[in-house]
Amino acid sequence: MKKLVKIQREILENAVASEAKNGVRKPIHVSNFGTDLSGFSKSYATYCAKMEQLVEAGFISRNIYPSDGYAYVTLAGENFINSYSNQ
């Protein structure tokens, strides 16, 4: 993943900034309902798809349970955002 859309960039930037400020990894909401989100709003389904792209790219991770509804920024995500911000 070479280019992030606005929501992806903002989510990662906020998570990295929160950790730098508070020393705690901020949880990022991701879908724990699988890929069929037909019963949810289009904006929520789009958000979840964008977060899944970050999971697949290795920028965020669910850590313990694949069906967990929260993910955390990884070192790869932190490095990507830091290099992205320095451009």
Image: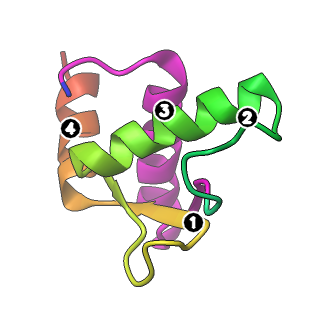
The answer to whether residue 15 is magenta is yes
Query: Mark 1 and 2 residues: CB-CB less than 8 Å, in contact?
Result: no
Using the numbered discs, state the Cα–Cα distance from disc 4 to disc 2 in whole angstroms. 25 Å
Q: Nearer the viewer, residue 49 or 63?
A: 49
Q: Nearer the viewer, mark 4 or mark 1?
A: 1
- Residue 75 x, y percent position in the rendering: 21, 59
Q: Secondary structure at mark 3?
A: helix
Any mark on residue 50, and which?
3
Upstream in the sequence, badge 2 or badge 3?
2
Q: Nearer the viewer, residue 44 or 19?
A: 44
The answer to whether residue 44 is magenta is no
Residue 85 sits above or below residue 32 on the image: above
Q: Nearer the viewer, mark 4 or mark 2?
A: 2
How many residues crowd around disc 3 within 10 Å: few (fewer than 14), some, or many (20 or more)?
A: some
Q: Dot 2 corresponds to which residue?
A: 44
Q: Is residue 37 left or right of residue 83?
A: right
The amino acid type of the residue labelled 2 equals Tyr
The amino acid type of the residue labelled 3 equals Lys
Any mark on residue 11, and which?
none
Does any portion of residue 26 appear in the rendered image?
Answer: no
Any mark on residue 80, and which?
4
Give the magenta-colored segment's residue range: 2-31
Taking the spot 48% from the left edge, 42% from the top edge, the residue there is 51
Taking the spot 81% from the left edge, 39% from the top edge, the residue there is 40
Residue 69 sits above or below residue 6 on the image: below
Any mark on residue 70, and which?
1
